[in-house]
Amino acid sequence: MKDQIMEVKTDPITEANGKLSSEHFQHKQPRLGKRSHELQNFGGVMKRLRIGLSDNVRSQSVLELNRILADSMMLRDLYKKHHWQVSGITFYELHLLFDKHYEEQVGLVDALAERIQILGGVSVAVPQDVAEMTRILRPPKGREAVPVQLSRLLEAHETILIQSRAAAARAVERGDDGANDSSIRSKEVKK
Ligand SMILES: [Fe+2]
């Protein structure tokens, strides 16, 4: 775990050709065609953050929370996929219901991502990275029947619940009570 702990870098911006520029990052203006080195690598945590948790404890929580975040983002997007693609005599009710649950997942995803950042980590964010990390099965691009859509959603919820309970127990054992966030779990119960 130690090799995942790193210092935040303050590197200069690079030119489009990959060479380092002498100019340092300016916050006020966009620098079109330029790319910055990463300030912090994915998988690492900021060192010696003053929140009363060791680097190793925060690193382990960030690792577990990022997996749950990836699963939650996949579930969020499954709800939107099914909101768009649902059909049949229950179309109207399910169309609305799927969007309601999508919004619930949006809130949970945001809470998870921001907890990871508070712990000094980096949250997984874009679909390609989510697809690599999630434990939820990829659905086909095409449209599926309602019972299959519902099954996929239930199975995804169960995967997240099983993983979250185990991860929450491990977080408490490490002394990271904040990662065992009862306000997030109570949102899940209300649905
Ligand atoms: Fe819509």
Image: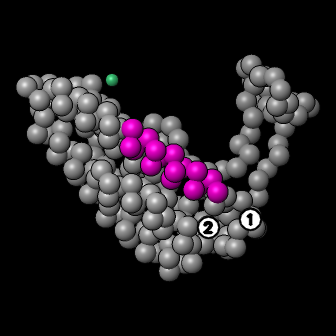
CA gap between label 1 and label 2 equals 9 Å
> Which residue shows up at 85% across the image and 30% down it?
26
Dot 1 falls on a residue whose secondary structure is loop
Q: Is 77 or 23 nearer to us in this picture? A: 77
Image vertical order of residue 119 relative to residue 29, above or below: below
Q: Quadrant of the N terminus?
A: bottom right
Instruction: Identify the residue position indicated by label 2 in the image.
Output: 58
Q: Is 14 or 77 nearer to us in this picture? A: 77
Q: How many marks?
A: 2
Q: Is residue 11 magenta?
A: no
Instruction: Identify the residue position indicated by label 1 in the image.
Output: 49
Q: Amino acid at mark 2?
A: Arg
x and y, in percent, of residue 134 in the image = 38, 49
Cβ atoms at labels 1 and 2 below 8 Å apart:
yes
Horizontal side of 2 relative to 14 (left or right) equals: left
Q: Is 83 or 131 nearer to us in this picture? A: 83
Q: Is 69 or 107 nearer to us in this picture? A: 107
Dot 2 falls on a residue whose secondary structure is helix
Which range is magenta?
103-118
> Which residue shows up at 46% across the image and 75% down it?
170
